[in-house]
Amino acid sequence: MNNLKTYQNYYFVGIGGIGMSALARYFHASGKKVLGYDKTNTKLTQQLMSEGIDIVFEDVIDNKITSLQAENTLVIYTPAIKKLGILDYLNENQFEVLKRAKVLGLITENTDCIAVAGTHGKTTTSTLVSHLCKEADLPFSCFLGGISENFKSNFLYNGTEYSVVEADEYDRSFLNLSPDWAVVTSTDADHLDIYGDKNMIEEGFKQFAALVPNGRQLFVRKGLDVGRDHKTYAVNEEADYYSDNLRMEHDKIYFDFHTPSETIKDFVWEIPGIHNVENATAALAILHNLGVDFETLKKAIANFKGIKRRYTKHIYSNGKIYIDDYAHHPTEINAVMGSIRTFYPDKKLLVVFQPHLFSRTRDFADGFAESLSKADELILLDIYPARELQENFEGITSDWLLEKVNSDKKEKSDLSGAFEKIKEKEFDILLTVGAGNIDTLYDPIAEWINSSVQSTM
């Protein structure tokens, strides 16, 4: 394989994926020619095209592909795509073809790499680490699994001494990295189509933790077993680094942060949820160990705006609240709904949920049912298949899942009919949640509620 810098062209198979698009932006920012394929035109692909990246949405061998030369073109693909004529052509014509995770590992291996892993919390934590690095003006680049509201992107270039990466456990991708610093936020069962069972996914995280050369630079949520020495972090219980004294004042969250030697009082931000304070604790621990002063960190925490589709909240003058979130696992849904119930215990909650993957729906059906039963009213959308086919999961449908939900106010809808159903409902809080294309409802809902408020003023 050539050195990455010798390639002039980079072709991305599945360029619209959140991790793939960050790499595409990196090479584009480096002055390389970037083009690619995705099966779906989304807001993200439209943004990439507006930045000058060439994307096609049909699996066709056109002149843009046939004009590429194998000796100066690197093909980058995601394992989520199982079958594609374009990829077959590129393989048959001896192009260098690498997984996204391998390329990310090559980019970051000559940096001081900060890798954030976990089945939940890694996007928020890695984005927050990146934001703190930016506010401290550290020379870093980041590759994120979500769109930072501060950066308006999932990629930022501010130098090359450090790199911040979201370490993805899917397909064991994170084992391609060379982390100098790392966080492990959670090791719950997920991606059982890859790992088989909870024991195997825990073993995968132990292998990831073993990649960190120094245990003093490995931060693990207290209670997790990663099979080696490490520093712990926690919320509302003592650990090497922990936060406590959480309270809410005027829609702001306050907390105190403890290191092994000192206590720093009154961090404040607008990001709700105990789980998010936990993510902040890990990020603060790393930046403190990088030598950033707490005055800088306090200011940075205060102006952190969060991540798109991670508890994105709108409060309207008529009292209605709209929250949109990416949660797609029962643990994540419980965290989001738990935060809503904590801060708004008496408000009527309408949940619109789109399951993601037939396999995940099958593996965690009882957990999903238990979580969704806590809604005052539920609209359950069809399962978003992503890389999977319904024919391989006979009987695994949203109708099947809905039967397990213990609620008198529940119904199923396809995505196209969901908006009209929402407009018929009475609610104080609306939560749209899921990792598929449910995000297409976001703009229509926000505009509808806003216009409803305006019409009554």
Image: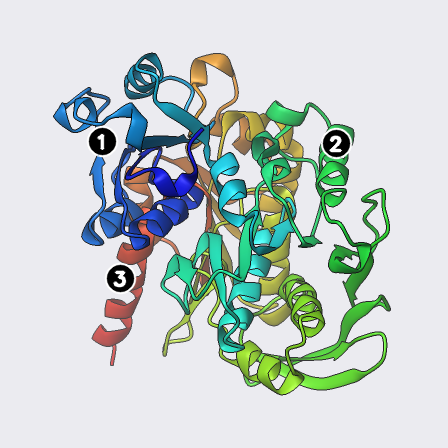
Which x, y percent locates residue 17?
Answer: 39, 40
Q: Amino acid at mark 3?
A: Trp
Left or right: residue 68 versus residue 390 is left
Left or right: residue 360 versus residue 103 is right
Mark 3–mark 1 CB contact (< 8 Å):
no
Q: Is residue 6 above or below residue 75?
A: below
Q: What whole-number distance in Å separates the C-alpha atoms at marks 1 and 2? A: 36 Å
Q: Quadrant of residue 259?
A: bottom right
| Secondary structure at numbered mark 3 | helix
Which x, y percent locates residue 193?
Answer: 60, 24
Which-is-in-front pick, marks 1 and 2?
1
Q: Which residue is mark 2?
A: 198
Q: Which residue is mark 1?
A: 57
Q: What whole-number distance in Å separates the C-alpha atoms at marks 3 and 1? A: 30 Å
Badge 3: how crowded within 10 Å, few (<14), some, or many (20+)? some
Residue 294 appears anywhere in the view: yes
Nearest to N terminus: mark 3 or mark 1: 1
Q: Which residue is mark 3?
A: 448
Which x, y percent locates residue 162?
Answer: 55, 61
Which-is-in-front pick, marks 3 and 1?
1
Q: What whole-number distance in Å separates the C-alpha atoms at marks 3 and 2? A: 42 Å
Nearest to N terminus: mark 3 or mark 2: 2
Left or right: residue 63 versus residue 338 is left
Nearest to N terminus: mark 1 or mark 2: 1
Q: Residue at x 34, y 40 (%)?
A: 16
Badge 1: how crowded within 10 Å, few (<14), some, or many (20+)? few
Q: Residue at x 68, y 86 (%)?
A: 266
